[in-house]
Amino acid sequence: MNSNWYVPPKTEIQAVSKQLTSSLVNGHYNQANLISRMLISQQWSPAVIYLDLIRSTLNHIGNLWHQGKILITEEHRATQFCLLLMDRVRNNFRLPTPNGMKISMAAIEDDTHVIGLYMTADFFRWDGWNVELLGSSIPNNDLIKYIDTTVPNFVLLSCTFPKSNQKLEQAIESIKLLNKGIKVLVGGPAASLIKDSNKYIDGFASDPLEATYVANKLVKTNPALVPLESVLLSLGDKIHTVRKNRNLSQSELSKQSGLARTFISAVEQGKQNVSLGSLKSISDSLGVEMATLLSD
Ligand code: B12
C-alpha cells in the first residue's frame, strides 16, 4: 500500500463514521457525497475506509434493520452507497505491476453477503493479483465446472452462515479433487468454524487485508506456484531500478553488455525470457550479483 495515505486517529474515524451512518440512515445523499469527496481528497487510506469506516457504518445500519428499526430498503440504500464509495476508492487507486497470479473469488451458494468479499477482491487487485470476482451465491456445480476450465492459482470462498458450511466444505473438497494444484482459501464469519477441522483448506483469513498476507505466504513457501511471467516482471523491474540508480541509459547498458537495446527494453518490461549468459552480461555491466537481480 502507498505510504502517503492518510491514516486518521481513531477519534476522527469514529466521528466520520457517525456522520456517514446518520446521513445514510436519513437518506441525506448530499452530505454522504461530501464525506465521500473529503475521504478521497484527503487521501484516506483505503484500508481505513474499508475496514474501519464502511465496516462499522454498514454493521451499525444493518443491525438497525435486523432490530426492525429501519426498512430493508433503507438498509439496501446504505449498502448501495457504500458500494459506490468503494467504486470511488477503487477508481482513485493506481494498480501495481501484475504479479502474474490469478485468484477467483465467490460467496458460497445461498450466501448473498458480499461486502467482505468485494473488499478482499480489491486488496488482492491492489497487491497486483489478477482477480476474478464471481460474486454472490454461486451454485457449487457451476463453480466447480468453471474452476475446472479456468484453473486459477487460488480460489477464495466466502461464507457468512454456519448453515452454509456444508456447501462450503463440499466446494472445497471438489476443487481439491480436480487435482490441479489449486490453493483454496476461505474467509467470512462462518468459515472460521471449519478452518481447523477441514484438511483441504490451505489458508483462512479473518479479514480482507489479512487474506493477501495468507496468500502471499503460501506463494513464498510454494515457489512452483509463481509463474514465469511474474519472475520476468520482477527481474525486469530490478534491472530497471539498478540501471537508473547507476545513471545509465538503456543504450549505454546495451553497449556495455553487448546486448541489443531493444532486448534490454523488453527485459525491463518483463516481456523477454533471459538466458543465463545474457543475465550475467547485464549483472556484470551493472556491477551487481546475478542473485541480487533474482532475489525477492
Ligand atoms: C448488510 C447485511 C445484510 C445485507 C447483505 C448486503 C450485501 N450485498 O452484502 C442483506 C440485507 C442482503 C442481508 C441479508 C440477510 N442477512 Co445479513 N447482515 C448484514 C449485516 C448487517 C452486515 C454485514 C456486512 O456486510 N457488514 C460489512 C462488512 C464489511 O463487515 P463484516 O460483515 O463484519 O465483515 C468483516 C469480517 O467478518 C470479514 N469478512 C466478511 N466476509 C469476508 C469474506 C472474506 C473472503 C474474508 C477474507 C473476510 C471477510 O472481513 C470484514 C471486514 O473486516 C450483518 C450483521 C453484522 N453486524 O455483521 C448481518 C448478518 C450477517 N445477516 C444475517 C442474516 C441472518 C441475514 C438473512 C438470513 C436475514 C433474513 N432473515 O433475510 C439474510 C440472508 C440472505 C442470504 N441468503 O444471504 C446474520 C447472520 C447470522 C448467522 N451467523 O447465521 C447477521 C450476522 C445478522 C444477525 N446478527 O443476525 N444481510
Image (spheres, rainbow, N blue to C red):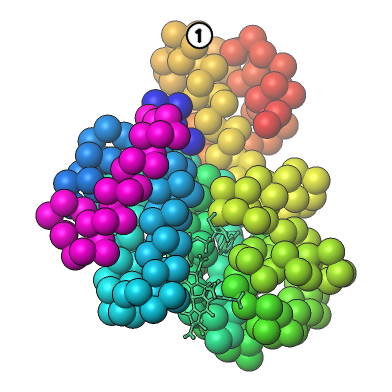
Residue beneath the point at 78% across and 75% down: 176
The image position of residue 25, as x and y in percent, is 26, 64
Residue 232 in view in this figure: yes
Q: Is residue 37 magenta?
A: no
Residue beneath the point at 16% across and 59% down: 29
Q: Secondary structure at mark 1?
A: loop
Write down the region rendered in magenta: 5-32
Relative to 205, is 133 on the left or the right?
Answer: left
Which amino acid does the dot numbered 1 rest on? Answer: Arg
Residue beneath the point at 69% across and 21% down: 292
Residue 121 in view in this figure: no
Q: Which of the 4 image quadrants contains residue 179?
A: bottom right
Residue beneath the point at 84% across and 64% down: 196
Q: Toward the viewer: 88 or 254? A: 88
Q: Toward the viewer: 105 or 278? A: 105
Q: How many marks?
A: 1
The image position of residue 293, as x and y in percent, is 65, 25
The image position of residue 258, as x and y in percent, is 56, 20
Instruction: Judge whether 220 appears above or below 153 on screen.
Output: above
Characterize the magenta stretch by its predominant secondary structure.
helix
> In this figure, which residue is indicated by the disc labeled 1?
246
The image position of residue 110, as x and y in percent, is 55, 86
Instruction: Judge whether 247 appears above or below 119 on screen.
Output: above
